[in-house]
Image (cartoon, helix red, strand yellow):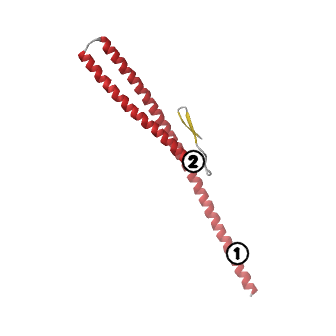
Amino acid sequence: MIFAVEQEKGNFKGRVFGGFNRHDVIDYIEKLAGERNGLLLENQKLRGQVDALEERLEQAREQNPDEEVRTVAAEALEDTRRVLEDVKASYDGICGDLNINVSQAAHELDVVGAKLAALQETLKSAGERLDAVSEKLQNTGETCDAENL
């Protein structure tokens, strides 16, 4: 199975009983979380810039009613808003990918858990059969000893 984040793909090594190498999945999830955290910081920084530009624009309007200053400031503010929207879209995409990957990893763990439970039951049943065979062999040995006396 391949987990994907936008254009990037992470291939995880399979395990003996199915599922994925736990460390590969954890590393991948940590990488996504790091990217998400980086985007959160960038988002906060850009929000601060938007707030600062809005404040500067308001001050410029009050101090200098010149139309050119307002136009330049408004364009700068709009550019910052677009960048902020792009960062938000990237952040939302990474969060969505992370949620999907966590869900898929949890499903794989459930599958592995079910396989291990079935294996445990099989081993328990085999142990019970071995105990029964051992008991029969012991009873047969005792019977043979009694006949030889």
Callout 1 amino acid: Leu
Give residue 145's mark. none
For the point 60% across and 49% down, the residue is: 15
For the point 45% across and 39% down, the residue is: 34
Label 1 vs 2, first from the N-terminus: 2
The local crowd at label 1, few if under 14, some if 14 to 19, many if 20 or more residues have their Cα within 10 Å, is: few
Tell me: 55 left or right of 114: left
x and y percentages locating residue 132 in the rendered image: 66, 71
Marks 1 and 2, Cα distance to the nearest angstrom? 44 Å
In the picture of the structure, the residue carrying the numbered disc 1 is 137
For the point 61% across and 57% down, the residue is: 119
x and y percentages locating residue 45 in the rendered image: 37, 31
Q: Secondary structure at mark 2?
A: loop
Give residue 21's mark. 2
* 1 vs 2, front mark: 2
Contact between labelled residues 2 and 1, with CB atoms less than 8 Å apart: no
Q: Secondary structure at mark 1?
A: helix
**Of all residues shown, which one is farthest toward the right?**
148
The one of 19 and 34 positioned closer to us in this rendering? 34
x and y percentages locating residue 39 in the rendered image: 43, 33
| Image quarter of residue 74 | top left
Callout 2 amino acid: Asn
**Of all residues shown, which one is farthest toward the left?**
63
